[in-house]
Image: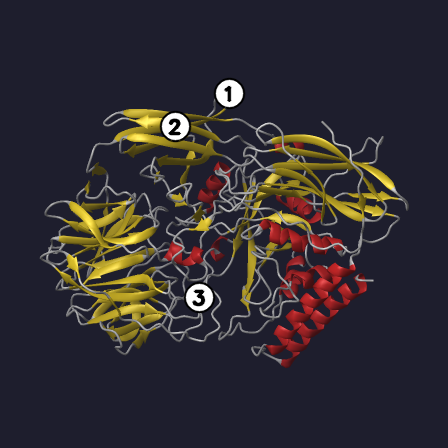
Amino acid sequence: MSIASRWLLAAVALTAGTTWPLAAQQREPVLRQVQVPHPYYWREMYVPQVTSGPSSASWSPDGRELVYAMQGTLWRQRPGDTVARQITRAEGYDHQPDWSRRGRWIVYASYREDAVQLRLLDLTTGTTRPLVADGQVHVDPRFSPDGTRLAWVSTGHAGRWHVFVAPFDHATGRLGPAERITEDRDSGLPRYYYSPWDHYLSPTWDPDGRELILVSNRGRIWGTGGFWRMAARAGAPMRELWYEETTWKARPDWAPDGRRVVYAGYHGRQWHQLWLMTADGGDPFQLTYGDFDATAPRWSPDGTRIAYVSNQDGNVALQVVEIPGGRITRVDPRHREYAGPVGRLTVRVRTGGGGGDPVSSRVTVRDTADRSWAPDDAWRHADEAFVRGERGFEVGYFHADGEARLTLPPGRYTVEAWKGPEWSAARVVVEVPARGSAAADLVLDRIMDLPSLGWWGADLHVHMNYGGAYRNTPARLVFQAGAEGLHLVENLVVNKEQRIPDIEAFRPGIDPASTDEVLLAHGEEFHTSFWGHTALLGLERHFLLPNYAGYVNTAAASLVPTNTGMFREGRGQGAVTGYVHPFDTGPDPFDRTTALRHALPVDAALGTLDYLEVMGYSDHHATAAVWYRLLNTGFRIAAGAGTDAFPNFASLRGPPGLVRVYARAGERLEHRRFLDALRAGRTMATNGPLVMLRVRRPGEAAWHEPGDELALPAGRHRLEVHLSLRSNTPVDRLELIGNGRTLASIPPAGERTTRDTVIRVTMDRSGWLLVRAAGDRPREPILDLYPYATTSPVYVSVGGAPVRSAPDADFFIAWIGRVREEAARHEGWNTPAERTEVMTMLDAARAVFEGRRR
């Protein structure tokens, strides 16, 4: 059914986009009690994660057994034996056990009831009960060597990471009044990734139970901090023993001899290994070696062995190294004795259409309490947020190649499969019997076969490795991307503090791990704390260095190289350039209460920018509002999309392809042709809905699609605009946008998943048209703020006149003026010439907008 309307598009006096109504219930972060910035760092790298393999081990008092977390419950096992015995069956997820040296008690962290409790397991009775359960986040519990005190880290004070100590009665298992022993201190330092308030992490006791070594960023601008030593009481002075960056993973452990401390660090390398230092500091030396992570070390009671977690094989595993000697033994839970009855579930995912072939996909298995489950050998992942009131925990999932087998407590389970926007989402409910088996068969049907139409989907912003629990490889990333229905994934190599985790993977062209269905390419993200983050795709010769700028208190403190300079360098290598994860809220250059340091309009003005992540780790409506202003001032900036996914994380914002961009690049999937289509704006960005746009003059055969220009003579012209929607998730409206204004809003048909309609508009001035679709609220299995999709514009030129908007030009003139003020105050220049270079660049960009306001 078509809807006929007449609209006049004015090319002047247009401001940024319409406001989208959002429902009260929205996605909120997991563990919102933590009032620390950048949760995707501390949550993955510090707060314990559910993994299918063992993690966070502790020794028994006699050194014969280990207790560790696995699949969200606690297990005990003897090194050298293959039998693991389950000792908790949680209502949530259990982590970080610590075994009292007197043998009766195990304290552990348990994620449940929207918080992380400390719980106590009595090994004499097998019962467990809350020890600290006040709605806050409590992690890293450690008994003192004599078992009379407990130290742990809590958000109980102001939502920040502090160390608390309390007396513990071994006879009753009761905890006395807790005392915060670390100072709540505003450092006054210009920290970018970290709060200005100092934090305190991972305490470990000395053998006498008098002192603690912990990790703190006191006095440091960058990183999680160094090692500090203090008496275990409030007001005790702290002294720094050693400083190096460990990206939340140091977790020191004091040796029983009192002289040595083991910890995980990377010490200028790309992967964490175990290091030894003295309890008084000194120069550390390396204990384990390899291009993988060795983390979470714990000394045996006799000081001859260290248990630790390794991801050498990709997934996490528990290993024990002998000191001295170096012999490494893997703790293999091959045979598992469960604490209660279990059943078996086989999940099979196949294509529809009569073929019935197995197909890789993202799979979620959840019980009636919303806890997630996974196979014993899978990489478990969990979402970063959820809608409280609709579910008890965030969505957990794993990627499967057509079939998966799980061991579960008996009960009812919901099983879901997802393979991106081109496929339907499947869901079944199954009952798993005790000591029996069940099967969940899911069928995925194609909604649209976009490659047959020349459209190919890519995630332009993925970080293969970035400090997560797992060790990812190109082959594994290709598998993950294929399970998400991607055709191309761009691994953006980037720094995490001083290191660049995937630098060894960088190579021009296509990675050899690519397949006929999925291409993998390695690009670069250029990090600055001033200009905004950017991407360079398709570098043809070499990685650009330095990889970051504007890092205060380092040799990279200068604002040079700028994004503009790096874009020009990259284009010299054939790169396509873009701004990534731009805006969570709309920037306001007229609000002088906050700083404004983003250089997006500078590169638009200077012609060095090809695309913008209009969908990314940001709010899509807020970003679109800025994008529309750029389009209104005549800049043809293509719509790109990138998840900023960390697929080696156990808990992450989203898998590769959570948001993606489709490019009309022809009948074959070729990297360079895709990048050319992206640069030309022949694109559509989405996290689920698929929208298409075609524009033509009535009676003409040829349609114009996104990225095309429809050139018209001067005068008034009627146009036909064809809008199309196909979605595997309901959306609330389909909209035609012209010059930043909503020209038509059409309700989707059926189950709010389809629509085809023609809108008739009238234009007498140059402008642009695009189509977007969105939902008013979050809708699983889309793990995003809300369903959303947008095309790039079709550009309409009337009489050869440029697109202009004085109010939008004024907006960017003020923006660049604010950036110039911030740059003028900067003190980290290497030379006066650098400062002059930047000021000249900003003045040139502002002059472009001044010319376009007329």
Asked which secondary structure carries label 1, the reply is: loop
**The one of 498 and 713 positioned closer to us in this rendering:** 713
Name the quarter where the N terminus is drawn: top right
Q: Residues within 10 Å of mark 3 (few under 14, many from 20)?
A: many
Q: Amino acid at mark 2?
A: Val
In this rendering, is residue 206 above or below 32? below
Name the quarter where the C terminus is drawn: bottom right
In this rendering, is residue 778 above or below 453? below
Measured in 3D between alpha carbons, the distance from the residue under mark 1 to the one under mark 2, in whole angstroms, is 23 Å
The mark nearer the N terminus, 2 or 3, is 3
Q: Are marks 1 and 3 in contact (CB under 8 Å)?
A: no
Q: Residues within 10 Å of mark 1 (few under 14, many from 20)?
A: few
Could one spot residue 762 in this view of the protein? yes
Q: Amino acid at mark 3?
A: Tyr
Identify the residue under disc 3: 194
Q: Amino acid at mark 1?
A: Gly
Identify the image quadrant of residue 761. top right
| Residue 682 at x, y percent in the picture | 69, 43
Q: Residue at x 40, y 53 (%)?
A: 468
Identify the residue under disc 1: 355
Measured in 3D between alpha carbons, the distance from the residue under mark 2 to the one under mark 3, in whole angstroms, is 43 Å
